[in-house]
Image (cartoon, rainbow, N blue to C red):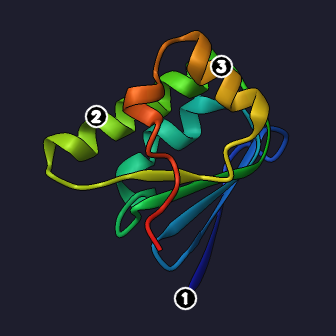
Amino acid sequence: MISKERANQETIDWEKTGNTLFLKGTLDRDSLLPLWQQKDRVLEGIDNIDVSSLNHVDSTGLALFVRLKGEYQQRDRTLTFSGVSERLNTLITLYGLQTLLGDNQPKV
């Protein structure tokens, strides 16, 4: 089942396919709000977020990932991130979040 959801068309799009949420565009403080406001509905049934089509993530976007990961852990659920770019990986490393987001590849 493919479900397409669109937020602010200039900044971030998302699409749900199976248990994966595909993010596309820019995830920053300006684009975050629509996704945050709908996160419970958008993340229903999701255990992987594919970030390979994000062209920019700032510290606010990274904070969203940390928050989501923490919420999943509190519910004894696993959330993985796939398609992590070198730039995003650098940001993760700069903030010392490798242990929290280090298992960012889905289990096959």
* Relative horizontal placement of residue 59, taking residue 54 as reference (left or right): left
- Alpha-carbon neighbours of circle 2 within 10 Å: few (<14), some, or many (≥20)? some
Spatial CA distance of label 3 from label 1 is: 33 Å
Q: Earlier in the sequence, mark 3 or mark 1?
A: 1
Q: What's the residue at 57%, 39% (across, down)? A: 34
Q: Position of residue 25 (x, y in %)?
A: 80, 44
Q: Are marks 3 and 1 in contact (CB under 8 Å)?
A: no
Q: Position of residue 30 (x, y in %)?
A: 69, 22
Q: What's the residue at 77%, 34% (across, down)? A: 86
Image quarter of residue 41: bottom left
- Alpha-carbon neighbours of circle 3 within 10 Å: few (<14), some, or many (≥20)? some
Q: Are marks 3 and 2 in contact (CB under 8 Å)?
A: no
- SS at circle 1: loop
- SS at circle 2: helix
Q: Amino acid at mark 3?
A: Leu
Q: Is residue 74 visible?
A: yes
Residue at far left of view: 75
**Which residue is labeled 3 in the image?**
91
Q: Position of residue 57 (x, y in %)?
A: 71, 28
Spatial CA distance of label 2 from label 1 is: 27 Å
What number is the disc on residue 70? 2
Q: Earlier in the sequence, mark 2 or mark 1?
A: 1
Residue at far bottom of view: 1
What number is the disc on residue 1? 1
Q: What's the residue at 45%, 39% (across, down)? A: 37
